[in-house]
Image: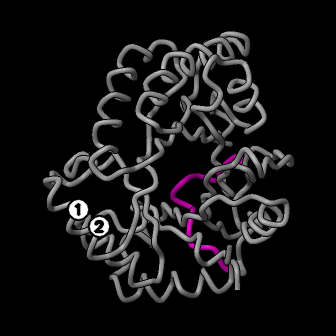
Amino acid sequence: MNPRERLALNRILSPQLPLPEFLKLTADLGMKMAEIRNDFAEKGVLDGLSESQLRKALAETGVRIITINALYPFEHGKHLKANLEQVKGLIAEARKVSCPHIVMCPFNEAGDPRTPAQRSADLVAALNAYGPLLTDAGMVGLIEALGFERSALRTKRAALDGIDRCDHPKAFALLHDTFHHYLSSETELFPRETKLIHVSGVVAGKAKPAIEDDDRILVDASDVLDSRGQVAALLKAGCEAPISFESFSPKIRSLPVPELKKALRASVNYLIG
């Protein structure tokens, strides 16, 4: 498949846009896939739109919604009961737009008192709890290891080990985020197990431990993450996952639509030519 046919936009790029306008932005860029989020408190996952309004917006743009971001903190035992209810709610929202995936992010705060063994046990217990719900819904949970030093699950290898040990391994897959791959210093790639790639860029100037989400811009030649190299390596190894632009920088999120379109087109051309 042509890499351009795999491209997607994450709604974090322009959270102020109503969902139908975000889908139009995606389509205007020639992309056919989008990710939506549950961390816009004032909007909800689907902007409070009716199913008929959602179907109309999707039909008019030809865009498919491929994930809801995100269940957090998905693997912390203290939050498991509440998370089970949240998963049910996210599945219900996903069904309205035929969305096949829920992104799952680990606990990401300093001072986690759990030992590595406890974290590992919590991870497997969480996957065992969510697995039947996802399987019944025909959905897959995409586990995103977060490379921050404070993160409870920093590497994709640790995530994959948890998937392999759980009772429902087919209900889960990996999300490769170029930002977190860099922060974790993980070198191993998992092209077959990776079902989504998140891309962003960071410019030089900060030590790795000091880099945060707000530093994530669109990928260009100044990128120290080598997102272009990461994506090229994954594709060369046979990865068939969508490639989604996910930049948290306020500078990107506040761009007017015409400027955002121009910046995204330039980033696409740099990333995959």
User: In the displayed structure, would residue 121 be above or below residue 269?
Assistant: above
The type of residue carrying mark 1 is: Arg
In the picture, measured across the screen, residue 182 lies left or right of residue 263, that is: right
Tell me residue 110's x, y (percent). Answer: 58, 28
Q: Which residue is drawn at 50% across and 42% down?
A: 103
Q: Mark 2 points at which residue?
A: 58
Tell me residue 200's x, y (percent). Answer: 61, 65
Q: How far apart are marks 1 and 2 (CA)?
A: 5 Å
Q: Name the residue under label 1.
A: 55
Q: Nearer the viewer, residue 208 or 43?
A: 43
Q: Which of 258 and 66 is in front in this view?
A: 66
Tell me residue 221's x, y (percent). Answer: 72, 81
Span highlighted in magenta in the image: 209-220
Crowding at dot 2, Cα within 10 Å, few <14 / some 14-19 / many 20+, comes out as: some
The type of residue carrying mark 2 is: Leu
User: In which quadrant of the rendered view does residue 36 lie?
Assistant: bottom left
Q: Do the residues labelled 1 and 2 touch (CB within 8 Å)?
A: yes
Q: Residue 212, labelled with which disc?
A: none
Q: How is the image coloured?
A: one colour
Q: How many labels does the image show?
A: 2
In the picture, measured across the screen, residue 88 lies left or right of residue 171, that is: left
Tell me residue 177's x, y (percent). Answer: 65, 53
Q: Which of 219 and 28 is in front in this view?
A: 28
Q: Which residue is drawn at 57% across and 41% down?
A: 142
User: In the displayed structure, would residue 222 be above or below residue 198?
Assistant: below
User: In the displayed structure, would residue 59 be above or below residue 167?
Assistant: below
Q: Which residue is drawn at 84% across and 66% down?
A: 236
